[in-house]
Amino acid sequence: MRKGFANAEEVETFLRPRLKSLSDPSLLPNMQAAAQRVLAALDRHERVVLFGDYDVDGVTSIALLTEMLRAYGGAPELFLPLRMEEGYGLSPESVERCLKQHHPQLLIAVDCGTSSVSEIVDLTRRGVDVIVLDHHEPKSALPDCVAIVNPKIDPESPFHYLCSVGIVFKLCHALLKTRPLFDFDLKSKLDLVALGTVADIVPLRGENRIFVRRGAIEITRRTRSLDSDSGRD
């Protein structure tokens, strides 16, 4: 109990993290709105762009969401800003290049976007819907978009420890709860979640412990192909 545990059950959960302990993804703010918009985009065959970050959390987040959307028959375009020329996140330069290259109808900002108020206003003005999946601290104003799935916009959320790949995993879980895919094993994708979680140096508590423990097992079980065009390993 000296380590901050209130009872024996909490000790057991800490020592033996299990997938069955994962919470309902709808507990994250705006998760249902994000999932419904993604499914609508898939149904309407919209042009979807995953706009990410160039660190490990950002790249694993995009990889996981790409595999999920491809499993539903989608064909998302992937976009990373040029670090030296365009900087981090939804900078005006990177947004302009993304629009010219991909002409998105739905842009999903992953591991960025919480503070991109003016850039998202511009995207919306140009007819692009935006979903933000992020874990960075919000500023005083939040972007006006379809959904911001970021536990840090809710002071009462118990999930402040999640990084972006954990949030993407929760979105994938929400999508599968709404529209099951019986040939898609989300658990097998926890190698990506573990990698992004450890690399982003977020606290290994709560569901992060489950992601990393089970993800480490998946890493030892599989070898990923360098060719991701098929969406299969």
Image: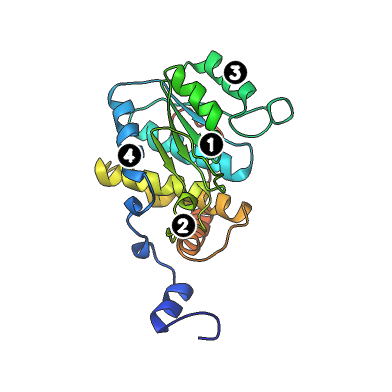
Residue that carries the numbered disc 2 in the rendered image: 155
Determine the residue positioned at 44% across, 53% down. 154
Mark 4 to mark 3: distance in Å? Answer: 27 Å
Identify the mark nearer the N-term, 4 or 3.
Answer: 4
N-terminal label among 1 and 4: 4
Assign a secondary structure to mark 1: loop
Which dot marks residue 97? 3
Q: Nearer the viewer, mark 1 or mark 2?
A: 2
- Find residue 135 and report its horizontal and vertical position in percent: 53, 48
Mark closer to the chain start, 2 or 4: 4
**Residue 186, percent across and down?**
38, 48
| Inter-mark Cα distance, 2 to 4 | 20 Å
| Horizontal and vertical percent position of residue 188 | 42, 50
What is the C-alpha distance between the residues marked 1 and 2? Answer: 18 Å
Using a 10 Å C-alpha cutoff, classify the residue at mark 3 as few (fewer than 14 neighbours), some (14 to 19) or many (20 or more): some
- Quarter holding residue 7: bottom left
Q: Marks 3 and 2, how far apart in space? A: 35 Å
Ranked by sequence position, the earlier of labels 3 and 2 is 3
